[in-house]
Image: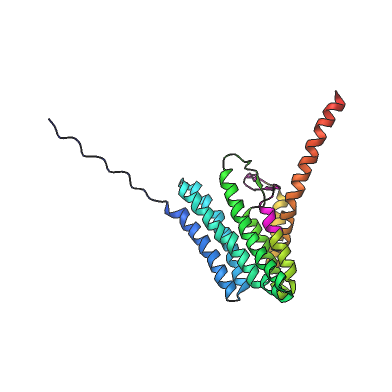
Amino acid sequence: MSDAPPPRRPPHRGIYLLPNLFTTGAMFAGFYAIVASIGGHYRDAVIAVFVAAILDGLDGRVARMTNTQSEFGVQYDSLSDLVSFGLAPSLVLYNWSLKYLALHGEAWGKAGWAAAFLYAACAALRLARFNTQVGVADKRYFQGLASPAAAGLCMSFVWAMEEFDIPGSDVDILSLVVAAVAGLLMVSRFRYFSFKSWPDRVPYTWLVLMLLALVALAVATGSVMFSIALVYVASGPVITLWGRATHRRRPRRVSEKT
């Protein structure tokens, strides 16, 4: 009798390095934003969150280009997003402005940290809902404001105020509104264009508009980014309400023809 073949060793389980390096970089940028805001370096904190957004957009593209997608990468990316676009913006807003609400009274002080927590909790809920809808939802649209866009709204608001030398203590109530609105929009059912189905070819005028936008960003980065964020945030309710109104008109037109 011949000896039985030796049992095969289980395949080595590892993770893909390249896309997860981008994810780690995004999480590091979010963590740095928190530390920078604690030290009072608010503009550095804001820039760090935007760097995290750039790295977050690259990790998925790199994974698809190199065919290194994995379930580990998906879950790791969500945890990184929670740090970079959930905890970091809420704590930057709190350290920069919301903490000064306590000067108006105890109740206002509680409202300040409650608004910061509301934003962070809504970001977690938004990410959890997104993970459960992968492969089911329409890829052309996000349901609810995406967490990087919500972070962009909050951080561009801080950047714009810093450009005009407006301290956070002077706009603490407005900061509370921004944090609450951004958080609630993340868990809303408003549809936002995802840019994933962006066409490869665009009209020539688009290139001119992009050039003008880059010039404007170079002149007043924070103000322009805040304006762009406001337009995108407003597009969700407009797209959703317009779609509902159009859907209601169709049955009426059909009934009128019949």
**Quadrant assignment for the N terminus:** top left
**Quadrant in which residue 175 is drawn:** bottom right
**Image position, residue 184 (x, y; %):** 69, 55
**Image position, residue 89 (x, y; %):** 62, 64
In this picture, is 201 found above or below 154?
Answer: above
Q: Identify the magenta region.
A: 181-201
**Quadrant in which residue 136 is drawn:** top right
Of residues 54 and 127, the one nearer the viewer is 127
Of residues 202 and 257, the one nearer the viewer is 257
**Image position, residue 180 (x, y; %):** 70, 60
Q: Residue furthest top?
A: 258
Q: Is residue 72 magenta?
A: no
Q: Is residue 183 magenta?
A: yes
Of residues 231 and 12, the one nearer the viewer is 12
**Image position, residue 159 (x, y; %):** 67, 69
Q: Residue furthest front?
A: 106
Residue 60 seen in render: yes
Of residues 46 and 109, the one nearer the viewer is 109
In this picture, is 103 found above or below 148?
Answer: below
**Quadrant assignment for the C terminus:** top right
Q: How many marks?
A: 0
In this picture, is 100 found above or below 58?
Answer: below
Q: Residue furthest left?
A: 1
* Identity of the residue drawn at 63% across and 55% down: 122
Q: Please, which colouring scheme is shown?
A: rainbow
Residue 167 seen in render: no
* Identity of the residue drawn at 70% across and 73% down: 106
Instruction: Please give left or right for residue 237 compared with residue 86 in the image.
Output: right
Q: Residue furthest right?
A: 256
